[in-house]
Image: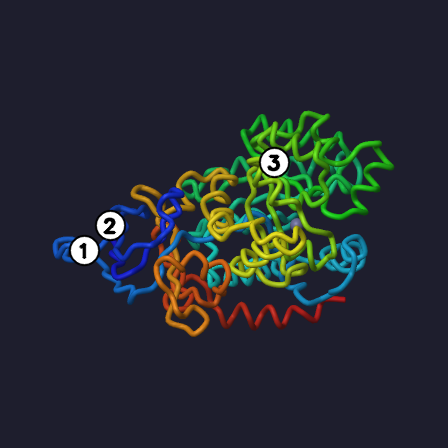
Amino acid sequence: MDTLVHNVWIITMDNSEKRIPFHGYLSILDGRIHDIDSGKPDQSLIDEAKEVIDGGGKWLMPGLVNTHGHLGSSLLRGHGDDLKLVTWLKTVMWPNEAKFDHDLVQTAAELAMMEMISSGTTTFLDMYHLAMPELAQMVQEKGLRAVLCRGMIAFGTESEQDEKIREAVSLADSYHNAADGRIRVMMSPHAPYTCPPDFYLKAAEQAMNHQLMLHTHISESPGEVDEHLRKYGMRPVEHMHRLGLLNDEVLLAHAVHLTDEELSMLKETNTAVSHNPMSNLKLGSGIARVPEMNRQGIRVSLGTDSTASNNNLDLFEEMRFAALIHKGVNHNPESTDAYSILRMATVDGASILGYSQTGTIRQGSDADFILINPDQPHLTPWTPERVVSHLVYAAKGSDVTDVWIRGRRQLENGFFLEFDRERILHKSNELVKYFE
Ligand SMILES: [Zn+2]
């Protein structure tokens, strides 16, 4: 036995019957959850373990899953707020990103990874166009879990476009299912307004040839849908459906502006959605029809998008927004419930990204879990029956004290074990002078 964590309240998320946490323990062997049970561990288990951790009555739950983001642009946090999506892309994001070098992108990625780990995220998806092999290397070495997408904007010549696809395929050849399955790779055309239909078809063909999922932004703002209608006479999701591009190996980011017919297309093809409520609110994009998606059984997960449009990567905050905004806009508090939101951020997100071994606490699954300190005014009073409610409606990322990913401890009482916190914060502040 490698590690035994006892005296914790465990919330498993492994089926809907066990919503109430139980007091117990779990042990880790070779990166996986070996034993999990209620009560106190036998003395023999304690003796056998190389490391014994008294959880002090903290809550133990699966690490959170962030299904959409752009780590490389993290240093743009707070730069260019309060602009429309297209204006923001054209005047803030793209001109600055054109000047980014690999060193800056790596620092930005490290900053984002630290932020995610310290707020309880153990699995993330990153769509970016620079330094993806370097990021893959970092994820591998630091023991993290990530879906990496070489984001592709298909402006430019055909040979430039083909080069981007070649880079994406090469990333997949080197890293898809690498690092004990912690790394996955997806093909990622950026969006219908930056990639023509032919490019989507090429990307989808490569995704099929290499058995990769496809990830793209779609129908994020009303302007995007109007422009698509003008250009192609159809809405973006409808267009993708007609091209035969929707299936259960596709993850759509945002999907805010969908008609009833488009929702049916997602249902029919079992296409998944990454819901990014805070980014959608900040850019004034709108509010996705998540309660309808849930009612129809469309698979939905949660994402933060980048710190440039959120402006943090705290999935606890994202859960709370996801739970609240739909109640508000639908004038119906029954539109969402805490347990379903928690599923979106854990087990459902993991399954949508193609991970079967994370997102739940069960014997044999990878040891990806976090500890939360409930001994704080905003989580008091608590009873086991109230824990799910507190996690969604009251908790913050800063309540997370400890994090393990595939059995490797990443955060210990708030301290990073794989990152040089001071160096990365200092360097990020230094690099800010390059922005316009
Ligand atoms: Zn995005």
Rendering quarter of residue 380: bottom left
- As drawn, 186 above or below 141: above
Residue 391 as seen in the image, left or right of residue 82: left
Q: Position of residue 409 (x, y in %)?
A: 36, 58
Identified at 46% across, 50% down, the residue is: 339
For disc 2, the neighbor class at 10 Å (few under 14, some 14 to 19, many from 20) is: some
The circle on residue 41 is 1
Q: Secondary structure at mark 1?
A: loop
For disc 1, the neighbor class at 10 Å (few under 14, some 14 to 19, many from 20) is: some
Q: CA distance from mark 2 to mark 1?
A: 8 Å
Rendering quarter of residue 278: bottom right
Q: Secondary structure at mark 2?
A: strand
Beta carbon at label 3 within 8 Å of ligand 1: no
Identified at 53% across, 57% down, the residue is: 315
Q: Between disc 2 and disc 3, whose residue precedes? A: 2
- In this orientation, does residue 198 appear? yes
Q: CA distance from mark 3 to mark 1?
A: 44 Å
Q: Position of residue 24 (x, y in %)?
A: 25, 56
Residue 204 as seen in the image, left or right of residue 36: right
Residue carrying label 3: 214
Q: Between disc 3 and disc 1, whose residue precedes? A: 1
Q: How many marks on residues? A: 3
Residue carrying label 2: 37
> In the image shown, does 434 or 6 lie closer to the viewer?
6
Q: CA distance from mark 2 to mark 3?
A: 38 Å
> In the image shown, does 278 or 98 lie closer to the viewer?
278
Q: Amino acid at mark 2?
A: Asp
